Amino acid sequence: MNHQDQPRYRPLLSNASAPLTHEVSALDERGRASSIAIPAERPLTVYVDKREIVTLMTLGGAPEALTLGYLRNQRLLRSLDDIVSIQVDWAVDAVAVVTRSGIANVEERTAKKVVTTGCGQGSVFGGLMDEVDQIVLPPGARLAQSVVYRIVETIRTQQSIYKQAGSVHGCALFSHDGELLYFVEDVGRHNAVDAIAGLMWLDGMEGGDKLFYTTGRLTSEMVIKGAQMGIPFLLSRSGTTQMGHMVAGKVGMSLLARCTGKHFLLLAGHERLVFEPDLLEPLNAPRMA
């Protein structure tokens, strides 16, 4: 978001975070009973001006931000000033979005739907590559190797639903020097990235000097959403897909995959990374007995 696009109004938001885990009983291989936590999963049907748009399967940790980020990344709403309120009601598993002037050509813009590779069956409206050619990421943005390692260590030590219950994806937004700004988990990485997009929109935060981390793979959907958020760096402990790699090259984004410990693979945007060889032991260094 550019400074000139800072919102004049902040929509009225509910505060309807739901429990993130659920206790169930289980038997192990010896028939012993125990109680374990599993991630909660619930539907959230999005209504905009009483018109049903989509049903999202979510943990429900940040439903207002998820809704806002989804509408932003789907390019259905362009300005935060257009939104009057976002109200979540878990009694009916729905969120009501009220706008000032509606969504222009809503039927046409939601007619074409693409089911993506996102966990939980993500979907996007319109063509995946719509508007990508118009995205320009900051050409001068650079990332120091030491910051990559700081981010990986921060994620490793982050308290999370994944460590408690497994079966979820996490996404995080970092500053240019590796400070954690947002951390969101959900049943699908596409939900987590949308929630962070919503938080950025609410806070008027730009992406040009930020870094995005996901535990999931860097698919075309993830790269496109990162580019829409203006973020020049995407990091993952997993890998990327051919189309994700292609889109990153098109928009000039750096992709760092298999980020664990001191290891990573820089797959795109090589010119943005500032290598720091002194951070690593020489390849021929003697091993300790």
Image (spheres, grey):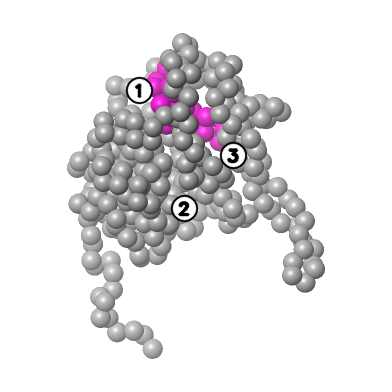
Q: Position of residue 226 (x, y in %)?
A: 37, 40
**Residue 25 got which mark?**
none
Q: Is residue 266 left or right of residue 76?
A: left
Q: Please give the residue where the numbered disc 2 appears in the rendered image.
A: 215
What residue is shown at x 43% (from left), y 15% (from top)? Answer: 104
Q: Amino acid at mark 3?
A: Thr
Q: Amino acid at mark 1?
A: Gln
What residue is shown at x 54% (from left), y 19% (from top)? Answer: 48
Q: Which quadrant of the figure has residue 238?
A: bottom left
Q: Please give the residue where the numbered disc 3 appears in the rendered image.
A: 58
The magenta segment is 61-81
What residue is shown at x 31% (from left), y 30% (from top)? Answer: 131
Circles 2 and 3, Cβ within 8 Å, touching? The answer is no
Q: Is residue 236 above or below residue 206?
A: below
Circles 1 and 2, Cβ within 8 Å, touching? The answer is no
Circles 1 and 3, Cβ within 8 Å, touching? The answer is no
Q: Position of residue 107 (x, y in %)?
A: 48, 18
Q: Please give the residue where the numbered disc 1 appears in the rendered image.
A: 6
Task: Compare marks 2 and 3 and give the one earlier in the sequence.
Answer: 3
